[in-house]
Each structure stands twice: as C-alpha cells, then as structure tokens.
Image (cartoon, rainbow, N blue to C red):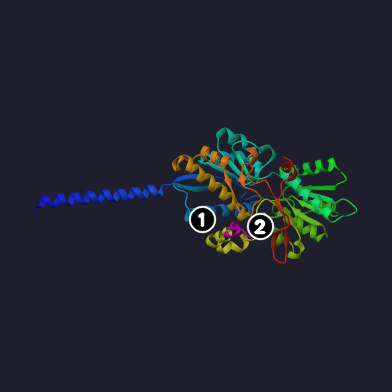
C-alpha cells in the first residue's frame, strides 16, 4: 500500500473515530444537562424555628436525592436553594426578590405568613408557592397552595375535640380552657380570635383564660399564674419558648392537660424533652396534627426510615423521633408529582412556573394513612383538610393516634 493510500485510510479512520467520540461526548453532555427546576425554600434557618426548619430542609433534600437515585424525573433535575427569613416578616420581600433572581420556578414557604405577605407578588409574577398550612386570606387564591388548613380552622377543630372529650366524662362544670401564645404572632392572634368568638357565642360551654408573652420569652411566672387552674392549655408557642414554658409549668405544679397546635409540639418535641428533668413529666401531652406520626403503620413511615438510613445514619435516631423530616418528605412528594405532571404536559425542557402551577391545580394523589385524597378540594387550594389528635407516651417515647381524622366544623358544615 502506498504512503498516500495509508494516509487516506488513517485520515478516514481518525475522522470516523473523532465523529464517534464527538457523538458520545454529545450524548453524555445531553444526558448531564437535564433541565433544572429550581425550588426556592424560604425558611427560618437561624431564628426561633431554626431547629424545625433545618430538619425540614434535610428531609426535602434527601427526598429529591432518593428520587434522583431510584426513579429520576425524565429530563429534569430538581434543585433546592434557600433563603433565611429568621422569622422576620420584613425579610420576606427581600427573600422573594433574591430567590426569584436565582431563577426559582416554585417557592416552598416554611410559614404561611410569608406566603400571605408575598401573595400579590406570586400572582403578579405568576410563580406558584407551596406551604404546609394556609391562612384565611390565602384560601381560594391563585398561585398559592398549601398542604393543610389554617390556624382558625385548627383552633375550631381543637375546641370541638376538647368539648366532646369533656362530655364523654361528665362533670358538674364546664372545662377551663387556657391558651398561651406569642404577642404579635399572627398564628396566636388567629387562635385567640376563634377562642374568643366561640366563647362569646356560648359562654356556658367553657371558661377561657389566655396569656401572651413577648417574642423570645424564657420565663413564664405571670402566664403560668394566670393559667395554672386550667383543665387544658392550648400551647401555641414555637421553639425554645415552648420548651421553657413546659418546663416551668411542670416545675410550678401544673397538673392539667397540655395540647400543642400542629407545629408547636411535634415540630420541636426534642427541645421539650431536653428541657424537662424526666420524660414522665411529659407523659400524656397531646397535639393536633395534619401529618402522620411514626407509629402509623404505613409505607410513608417506612420510606422515611429508609431515607434516614441511606442519607443520614448518624442523625437517624434524632430525626426519626420527630415529625419534621417526614413532613418534608410529604412536601417532596407533592412537589415531585407536580414536576412529573408538568413534564407530561409540556415536556421536560419547557417546565416552568406556569406549567407547575397548572400541575398543582389538577393534582390528585392518594397516600395510605391520610384522611382524604390530596387535591384542591371543591375549588380550594388546600390539599388535605383533615386533622387528628395524638398523645405522647413517655414509656415508649413516641406519639400515638387517639382519634380518627376529622374535618374542622366550618368545613364539615359545607
């Protein structure tokens, strides 16, 4: 073979080889460059709810790691970015602008208060937002969604259970119901207003006593003095103040029942346990919840335990005792389903805020253990409207369900 022919053959071979390699590199590049869907997590990472928010972030992050490993969303990769509100309402608009500037396709709000503050921005910019619980002004609004009900409905439901439980054990007097909250917090104001309205409508049903402390309170002599004779106290405090209130109430001899709102106890129970000298002091504590608890025998609990062992074995014992990590996985399931629906409707590369909003509007999921299908019920933007009451048992160091799922009276009457 002549040198010229050899050079021609070699050149052709190299051209084919380079073309093949280029094709392989191109395919690899195409595979690596999945369309990013950005979830902007606006949460309290250094304020009074930091412990819970941190657990939620871990749960949400691990959930999407699990999705990526076990069942990737075709053509899409979810990315979570965060902004720290420090539970300072003034930081909400700043955080919104920053997360929007980072390309956020959907917001995940730790608190419905921030979702309420930012609702008009979401609607003007047409960027959806999802949060755990709603507020009265958000119900039925476009571009904002929640997993569960707002505090006024929760307060209605709590009072419904308290009064029915009291009637099952007939007494010669009505119950004395207490409520402790944080001055200036909208959640405390909302619960306060419901309790006042219910009491005003029929004062013979229960006596009402309330006490409010400033943000960050750590001493409770005045509040406990006011509430010490209550048969049950609705504890509507977050983080360290909740733990210090329980510690001081027990130390000062309070013997009535303690019932936490949905976020108060279950979101910060490790703090409460660390604050009291003995777990037995917390035995029988009650909590309203819109989520599952770890003693529910359902696949979601098994999924959460698997996630902990895979991604956070060193923290599994602690994170597995609370409900925040699992609640974050519930949020992850909703967000994943919205992304998958959007991919089916518009294609992976076209998934944007509008497509995710359309997906949330039409979402419908059935998950074992919950009270109803997750969807926008009757035109609302709330996916799961029911709650239960659970009880802490110190001997087992766990929460146990003591009621069936039920709707708040206002929703049950519809």
The furthest residue to the bottom: 395
The residue identified by callout 1 is: 66
Q: Residue at x 48, y 56 (%)?
A: 70
Q: Position of residue 146 (x, y in %)?
A: 63, 44
- Between residue 187 and residue 366, name the one nearer to us: 366
Asked if the stretch drawn in magenta spans residue 294, the answer is no
User: Residue 306 lies in what quarter of the image?
Assistant: bottom right
Classify 10 Å Cα crowding around label 1: few (below 14), some (14-19), many (20 and above).
some
Q: Which mark is residue 293?
A: 2
Specify whether residue 11 is in view. yes
Q: Which mark is residue 412?
A: none
What is the magenta range? Answer: 297-302
Residue 393 vertical placement versus 236 (above, below): below
Specify whether residue 218 is in view. no
Q: Residue at x 75, y 61 (%)?
A: 282
Q: Position of residue 19 (x, y in %)?
A: 26, 48
Residue 360 vertical placement versus 252 (above, below): above
Classify 10 Å Cα crowding around label 2: few (below 14), some (14-19), many (20 and above).
many
Residue 51 vertical placement versus 343 (above, below): below
- In which quadrant of the rendered image does the N terminus lie? bottom left
Q: Secondary structure at mark 2?
A: loop
User: Residue 111 lies in what quarter of the image?
Assistant: top right
Q: Residue at x 80, y 44 (%)?
A: 195
CA–CA distance in space, label 1 to label 2: 21 Å
The answer to whether 172 appears left or right of 360 in the picture is right
Numbered circles on residues, count: 2
**Marks 1 and 2 close (CB-CB < 8 Å):** no
């Amino acid at each position: 073979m002549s040198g010229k022919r050899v050079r021609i053959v070699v050149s052709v071979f190299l051209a084919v080889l380079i073309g093949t390699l280029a094709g392989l590199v191109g395919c690899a590049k195409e595979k690596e460059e999945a369309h990013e869907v950005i979830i902007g997590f606006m949460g309290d990472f250094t304020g009074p709810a930091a412990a819970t928010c941190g657990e939620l972030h871990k749960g949400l992050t691990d959930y999407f790691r699990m999705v990526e490993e076990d069942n990737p969303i075709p053509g899409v990769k979810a990315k979570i970015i965060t902004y720290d509100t420090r539970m300072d309402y003034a930081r909400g608009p700043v955080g919104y602008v920053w997360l929007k500037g980072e390309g956020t396709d959907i917001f995940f709000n730790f608190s419905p208060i921030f979702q309420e503050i930012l609702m008009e921005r979401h609607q003007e910019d047409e960027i959806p937002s999802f949060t755990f619980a709603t507020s009265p002004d958000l119900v039925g609004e476009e571009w904002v969604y929640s997993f569960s009900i707002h505090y006024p409905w929760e307060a209605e439901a709590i009072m419904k259970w308290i009064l029915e439980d009291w009637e099952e054990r007939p007494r010669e007097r009505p119950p004395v119901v207490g409520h402790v909250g944080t001055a200036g917090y909208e959640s405390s104001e909302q619960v306060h207003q419901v309790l006042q309205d219910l009491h005003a409508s029929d004062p013979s049903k229960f006596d009402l006593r309330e006490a409010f402390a400033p943000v960050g309170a750590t001493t409770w002599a005045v509040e406990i003095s006011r509430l010490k004779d209550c048969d049950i106290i609705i504890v509507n405090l977050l983080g360290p103040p909740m733990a210090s209130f329980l510690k001081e109430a027990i130390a000062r001899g309070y013997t009535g029942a303690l019932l936490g709102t949905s976020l108060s106890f279950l979101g910060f129970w490790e703090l409460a346990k660390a604050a009291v000298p003995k777990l037995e002091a917390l035995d029988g504590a009650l909590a309203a919840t819109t989520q599952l608890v770890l003693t529910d025998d359902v696949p979601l609990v098994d999924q959460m335990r698997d996630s902990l062992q895979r991604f956070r074995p060193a923290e599994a014992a602690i994170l597995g005792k609370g409900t925040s990590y699992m609640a974050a996985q519930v949020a992850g399931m909703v967000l994943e389903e919205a992304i998958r629906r959007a991919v089916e409707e518009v294609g992976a590369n076209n998934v944007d805020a509008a497509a995710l909003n359309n997906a949330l509007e039409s979402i419908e999921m059935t998950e074992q253990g919950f009270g109803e299908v997750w969807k926008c019920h009757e035109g609302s933007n709330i996916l799961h409207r029911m709650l239960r009451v659970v009880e802490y048992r110190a001997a087992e160091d766990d929460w146990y369900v003591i009621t069936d799922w039920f709707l708040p009276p206002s929703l049950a009457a519809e």
